[in-house]
Image (cartoon, rainbow, N blue to C red):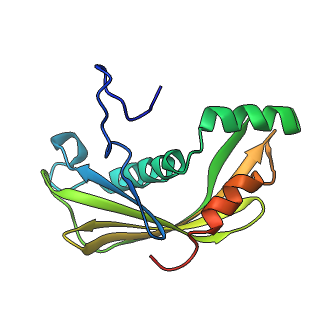
Amino acid sequence: MNDTAGPQGRSWPDLAGRLVPGGHVLAVRVYYEDTDFSGFVYHANFLRYMERSRSDYLRLLGVEQGALFEEAVKEVGAGFAFVVRHMDLDFRRPARIDDILEVHTHPAEVRGASLTLAQSVRRDGEVLVAAEVKVAFVAGERATRIPLALRKVMGADVGPA
């Protein structure tokens, strides 16, 4: 089943965002539930938006995380996970209810067992939050090599967005 298909089989082509030269962009609307008592987006919700963008980027690259899990089980006898190893964040401007945000993601470095991704959350082109995220590929509770096919496709996008 197509992950972007709705309950009636209709396609939702932008549900997972879109691939752009050098990476991925995901649109996010700010809802009441995303805000704190002051009416601004609660800071931790920016992390959720960035996580969604990273997952959807993989999805649009053709990486089915279930299939990747099975491949890891065959290769190393255990399932896999991408785990955040390090994250630098720079909160520059607030976002408010009903804002339409864009989460931009692009690989900055692709290594054997880790990826470094540059991410930003923007409103009307203005960067609200900038982040650099290093994720490690872990199987059986230890770092392991990212499958070559994924390293190649991610490596093709390395560079400034």
Q: Is residue 7 left or right of residue 35?
A: right
Residue occupying image coordinates x 18% and y 70%: 124
Residue 49 versus residue 8 in the image, above or below:
below
Looking at the image, the residue that sits furthest to the top is 8
Looking at the image, the residue that sits furthest to the front is 10
| Quadrant location of the C terminus in the rendered image | bottom left
Residue occupying image coordinates x 15% and y 56%: 99
Residue 108 versus residue 54 in the image, above or below:
below
Residue occupying image coordinates x 54% and y 51%: 61
Q: Position of residue 35 (x, y in %)?
A: 21, 48
Q: Is residue 23 left or right of residue 100?
A: right
Residue occupying image coordinates x 69% and y 62%: 152
Q: Position of residue 73 (x, y in %)?
A: 80, 32
Q: Is residue 87 left or right of residue 6?
A: right
Q: How many marks?
A: 0
Q: Position of residue 119 (x, y in %)?
A: 44, 66
**Figure quadrant of residue 91:** bottom left
Q: Is residue 95 left or right of residue 17?
A: left
Q: Position of residue 102 (x, y in %)?
A: 29, 61
**Figure quadrant of residue 47:** bottom left
